[in-house]
Image (tube, helix red, strand yellow):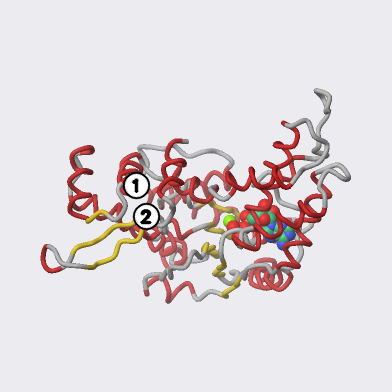
Amino acid sequence: MLLWDETLFKNGEVLELDYVPEYFAHRDSQMQALKFSLKPAMRGMRPVNCLVKGPPGTGKTTAVLKVFSEMKEHAGNVVFVKVNCQMDSTRFAVVSRIYEKLVNIKPPTSGIAFRKLFDKVIKQLVDSNKILVVALDDINYLFHEGHADEIMYSLLRAHEQYPGVKIAVIAIISDVGISHHFDPRVGSVFLPEEVEFLRYDANEIRDIVTNRIQHAFYQDVVPDEVCERVVEYVDLTGDLRVGIDLLRRSGLNAERRASRKISLEDVEKAYEASRLIYLCRSIRSLAEHEKTLLGLIAKENNMQAGELYKSFHEITGLGYTRFYEIIGKMSDSQLLDADFSGKGMRGRTRVIKPRYEPQDILKCLEQ
Ligand SMILES: Nc1ncnc2c1ncn2[C@@H]1O[C@H](COP(=O)(O)OP(=O)(O)O)[C@@H](O)[C@H]1O
Ligand SMILES: [Mg+2]
């Protein structure tokens, strides 16, 4: 039995999702490539832009944050900003985040135009003679509706309008199987160094998971077979975040049973929740009407676009254009398949299918 103040966690903080680990192995070549690209900034030159690519949970964000914090110590003339594009999903929000970092004050949220705020940022950079490095993390969330191109364009062409300003962009794309392309006007000024993050192999996963277990739990709390099961699940999903979340949840499950050891059943139970983190997270970032539409699609498998639109319109009062925009956005973020097939109006009808188990979608929608 565990006493009320007893715990299995030596340091539970290392299992938080935004924790930046001290031990970060198996990414040396990527870290080198990033450092090499940013190095010119130390000599007052514009750094090389980077395109960081790879599946979710392969260490992209962590690598960039680690490089930033190492370089910060040696480069007082450089401002490093990481923007989470899933949260800051417009050009204005991104520039607000940069402004906030530069002057330590949040800009007003209304009554100021993008252009004006952007001018302030540039002026601040020029006046303080600083170089700006912006990491646009998970920029794939900005591809629909063209926000990604707008932001990149503004940042990368700033020096044409404001001579002397030096800005470099690290675009981080979470690669979920669809290819994203920037507008050619962006492409011609971006010219990035590409840094690829491949999935970890089973040995690498085992090494990282074992290390995290040592920091997080007291000795003997996690039997080898439990560690191995966690490694298998990470290998299955390719996403280390699933493993870290699994460890945290299985630890809590064991505590709830008042056990001093985590069992395989604790892991299985935890996996039910962990495997849905991605889905739930992308669902949480949807607007209300988007959630409504996704709910309809999950309830009625394989609905034709026409019928779906009718139900959607009845509930929300929104029109066709908006309906198709939302479908496009959700199929970009891999929630839906929207195929043209069969016959219908003008010879083709779209069948819209969810890409996850409908009951999983409904579960996440309820949260
Ligand atoms: N090489 C590694 N060593 C230790 N932990 C890692 C490593 N790679 C990823 N992680 C951990 O896995 C989780 C996901 O990493 P993250 O950088 O957020 O991935 P991405 O940005 O590619 O989705 C984080 O909790 C991070 O600490
Ligand atoms: Mg990331």
Q: Foreground residue, 30 or 234?
A: 234
- Badge 2: how crowded within 10 Å, few (<14), some, or many (20+)? many
Give the residue type that dot 1 points to: Leu
Q: Secondary structure at mark 1?
A: helix
Report whether the residue tagged 2 is closer than 8 Å to ligand 1: no
Please provide percent x and percent y for residue 238. 61, 63
Q: Secondary structure at mark 2?
A: strand
- Determine which residue is flagged by label 1: 294
Give the residue type that dot 2 points to: Pro
Q: Quadrant of the N terminus?
A: top right
Q: Tell me which corner region of the image, top left, top right, bottom left or bottom right, holds residue 55.
A: bottom right
Which corner quadrant of the figure contains ligand 2? bottom right
1 and 2 marks in contact (CB < 8 Å): yes
Q: Is residue 25 left or right of residue 234?
A: right
Q: Foreground residue, 53 or 185?
A: 53
Q: Residue at x 51, y 47 (%)?
A: 97
- Cα–Cα gap, marks 1 and 2: 8 Å
Q: Tell me which corner region of the image, top left, top right, bottom left or bottom right, holds residue 249.
A: top right
Relative to 152, does residue 4 appear above or below in the rendering? above
Q: Residue at x 70, y 37 (%)?
A: 253
Residue 214 visible here: yes
Q: Foreground residue, 312 or 105?
A: 312
Relative to 135, does residue 213 appear above or below in the rendering? above
- Determine which residue is flagged by label 2: 354
Residue 96 - label: none
